[in-house]
Image (tube, grey):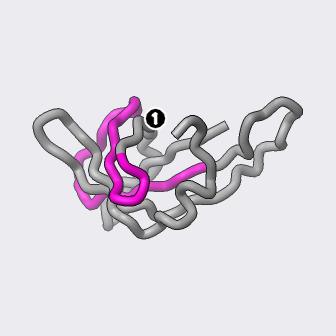
Amino acid sequence: MDLLTLQHFAGCVGQAFDLSLGESTVPLTLSEARPSAQQILPGMRREPFSLLFRSHSAIVLPQQIYRLKNMSLGILDIFLVPVARDKDGIVYQAVFN
């Protein structure tokens, strides 16, 4: 895929994504895919959007680029940032401008 868009992820909400940690993986679920409130500027190649992934692990992974694998989208490298922790686990966000 040349340029990921919200449309790529919209149909994947609720689907599993495996986050690779070398020899092991951490299961994530895409819980939200929504357009960004950011203004679209001339010359932008896509409409900004954000994704929220949920992990049921209690371990917080640092913000960085992770390799994710999904049955619909295949293998993607996405920059994830931990943004919340609740009783169900950790929430990670990816923002695409």
Instruction: Tell me the residue at 51%/43% (across/down).
Output: 94
| Residue 64, percent from left and from top | 39, 30
Q: Residue at x 28, y 45 (%)?
A: 19
Q: Nearer the viewer, residue 54 or 23?
A: 23
Q: Which residue does the image show at 40% across and 33% down from the upper left?
A: 63
Residue 35 place in picture, x, y as percent: 69, 55
Tell me: residue 59, above or below residue 33.
above
Which residue shows up at 34% across the image and 58% down it? 71
| Residue 60 % position (x, y) | 29, 43
Q: Which residue is mark 1?
A: 79
Label 1 environment density (alpha carbons within 10 Å; few <14, some 14–19, many ≥20): some
Which residue, as the protein is rendered here, is positioned at the far bottom?
Answer: 14
Query: In the rendering, at what x and y percent does residue 90 appear?
Result: 35, 54
Query: Quick check: 44 left or right of 24?
Result: right
Tell me if 93 is positioned left or right of 75 in this view. right
| Horizontal side, residue 53 vs residue 69: left or right | right
The residue lying furthest to the right in this view is 42
Magenta residues, start to end:
50-74
What is the three-letter code of the residue carrying label 1? Phe
